[in-house]
Image (tube, coloured by chain):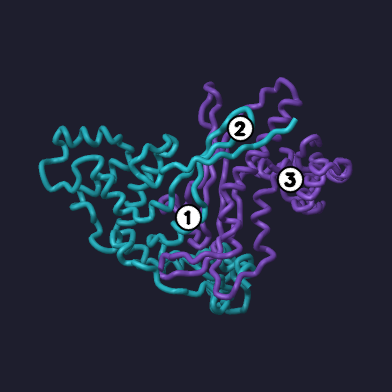
Amino acid sequence: MHLDIVLSLRVGSTADQGSPQPTAFSQHENEDPDNSDYESDPELEIEDQGAYNEIENDRQDDSDAEDTSEPPARGRPSSQEIIPGAGRLLGDVVNYTVLNLATTNDPRSPFSSEVDFNLASWFGRKKVAKSQIDAYFAHGLGGTDGSSFRSAYTMRQHLDELDTFGTYLVWTEAAIDDGHHATTFYYRNVIDCVRFLIRQVAYRSQMVYAPVREYNSSGERLYSEMHTADWWWDTQV
Amino acid sequence: MCKCSLFLVLRVYCICWYNTLPAGATVVPIIGLSDQTHLTNFSGDKKAWLVYMTISNILSKTRNSPAKMSVLLVALLPVPPKLTGKSSQADETQRQINADSLRAVFDLVLARLHYVSHEGMVMDCADGKTRLCFPILLAWIADHAEHTTFHGIGRKSCPKCEVPCNEVGGNPRDVYEVRDYAIYEDKARQLESGEAGSTREYFRLGFVTGPRFRGVGTK
């Protein structure tokens, strides 16, 4: 018996937002409000930036917590060893400010007010159907003026504006045929997912690009985050 | 299409252990996660098979926080049909089909990763700079059943070492050989090309819990 797997590809036109998406991926739609939520939430941004040093300290505190028998001073890295040139910068991202306008400019942009923003956020989080959103406005519940969106469609457009990198997360539909049944499956481009994650401004203060070896005052090696351990170092050198 | 078993996770995983990266490179370690998720009772026992990924460049505090949403859904794998249990021969064939199709799917999903982890790719980073990034599949977080499926070994075997299944959980001081999936793959290839005898003996004699091959039953 000889069984062959025939892999047939049907690259869906998922880049086109208007096209019907497979129902299994309705969460992709729902992800966007959340994404846009944290990207544009100014408090989070500010907190992230201000908390950077705090977080650094936290990490060191974590290693303290693991090693309770030692005096706190020993758990703090007093010296570091790095690989010169690792994670070297090549240049600037083209249009960096333009791409991240939504997160840096008016915190509520493209929504006109906090009420609007919260409404859209609630619609997204509660997974309100498009028809229900339209019905909400048709019944005049959204007020008469001042709202920056009057339908599910315009809300969607605002969200697309916030979600600059949504094109990275396109789904591809494929089918595998083992001779008896064809089974459909879906996948994203792994590399694009990496690119999506690594360029998220929301993680800016939380990113590391190079390994480091940390030592405490008595010269003992300290391990905390992944980039302070050996694998990363060995792979790099 | 290759009929040998799945060594997919380790195969990609091994790439960069032997290569060092050019100076100035940025390592982007990828963490994969997967699990079969049970969806319905009494109506066909529907399952979803989800594969997620995240990158280790994000500090663990953020990476592990559900609210920061740093884990992306990468694939929904095809869920194989349930085994009928009518005959062991048919079930064994079905298992082999499942293993082959899983491998084909992963080859497809990780195909670009395979290339880019060798060549690198200039990526835009969060701080507004570009770097030459090497995404490397570093870890696969899954439960035991998932690991055995991916490695094509029996449910009672250890994916890390060649402990026979009746000695699992035995003396903790016993040390067993670490599984070398490259050897298994070679053996599987030999089986394909017709030098089957040696493979059969290899797994019968040495390792009762070797990988599942067509025609070589595992106990």
> The residue marked by circle 3 belongs to what chain?
B
Identified by mark 2, the residue type is Pro
Mark 1 element type? helix
- Distance Cα–Cα, label 3 vs label 1: 33 Å
Q: Position of residue B118 (x, y in %)?
A: 61, 63
Q: Is residue A46 left or right of residue B9?
A: left
Residue A237 quadrant: bottom right
How packed mark 3 is, by other alpha carbons closer than 10 Å (few <14, some 14-19, many 20 or more), is: many
Residue A149 quadrant: top left
What colour has chain B?
A: purple
Q: Residue at x 51, y 31 (%)?
A: B39
Q: Position of residue A229 (x, y in %)?
A: 60, 67
Q: Which mark is residue A192?
A: 1
Q: Which mark is residue B80?
A: 2
* Labels 3 and 1 touching (C-beta < 8 A): no
How packed mark 2 is, by other alpha carbons closer than 10 Å (few <14, some 14-19, many 20 or more), is: some
Q: Is residue A93 left or right of residue A121?
A: right
Chain in cyan colour? A
Q: Position of residue A121 (x, y in %)?
A: 29, 46
Identified by mark 1, the residue type is Asp
According to the picture, the residue beneath numbered tag 3 turns out to be: B158
Q: Could you say which is closer to the camera, residue A11 or residue A149?
A: A11
Mark 2 element type? loop
